[in-house]
Image (spheres, rainbow, N blue to C red):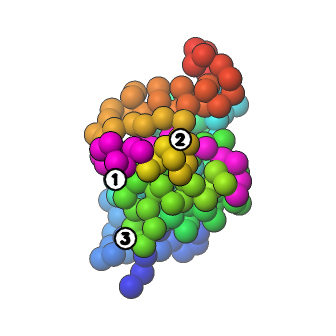
Amino acid sequence: MTIPTWHAAAAPRICLPGLSPSGWPFSLRAQEEGRSGTGAPPRGRVLVVEDEYFVALAAEDALASAGFEVVGVAATAEEAVEIAGTERPDLVLMDIRLAGARDGIDAASEIRGRLGIPSLFATAHSDAATRARGEGAAAPLGWLTKPYAPTELTAAVAAALAKLRGQDGEGT
């Protein structure tokens, strides 16, 4: 079984089960267009970890449009750790339920422990037990509950990066 995955450096891309790359209705826009926002210096470098293709596409598009540099998109914990090690983003936007055996809390914990890179959890699974496990294992910079609007996503990423940089979140 092929694990669904995509990354800017992957060529050819491994795609979602049942779809060939030529069958994708959309590409990951920033990767295809080679853009990283508006041409101004990026507001921050973000790795998106999300196993739902269209959710990842929307997140990447919203972040790039808001001036963030999306350094990659991963669908599994293993790929997230690999891309984080290679690309060294400022922040990982991490879903909790991922394709594969490991979840986003495991990946965020490993990325923070090995690389010192924090995560912002974006998930529909934010019950008290999941939050307690996530806080204890990965010390995330925040939680964004799905479904969310693009403006909520970009505001949460900006606030997380401001928190990381010791700022108040204004003007980031």
| Label 2 or label 3, whichever comes before in sequence order | 3
Residue lying at 53% horizontally and 41% vertically, measured from the top left: 140
Q: Nearer the viewer, residue 3 or 20?
A: 3
Residue picked out by circle 1: 54
Residue picked out by circle 3: 16
21 sits to left or right of 117 = left
Magenta span of residues? 114-132
Secondary structure of the residue carrying tag 2 is loop
- Residue 140: mark in rendering: 2
> What whole-number distance in Å separates the C-alpha atoms at marks 3 and 1?
11 Å
Any part of residue 130 in sight: yes
Any part of residue 7 in sight: no
Residue lying at 55% horizontally and 31% vertically, measured from the top left: 160
Residue lying at 66% horizontally and 47% vertically, measured from the top left: 117
Taking 57 as reference, is 146 above or below it?
above
| Label 1 or label 2, whichever comes before in sequence order | 1
Image quadrant in which the N terminus is located:
bottom left
> What whole-number distance in Å separates the C-alpha atoms at marks 1 and 2?
24 Å
Q: Nearer the viewer, residue 127 or 14?
A: 127
Q: Magenta stretch containing residue 7, yes or no?
A: no
Q: Amino acid at mark 2?
A: Pro
Secondary structure of the residue carrying tag 1 is helix
Marks 3 and 2: in contact by CB < 8 Å? no
| Label 3 or label 1, whichever comes before in sequence order | 3
Image quadrant in which the C terminus is located:
top right
Residue lying at 51% horizontally and 47% vertically, measured from the top left: 136
Q: Amino acid at mark 3?
A: Leu
Give percent across and percent down for residue 100.
Answer: 42, 72
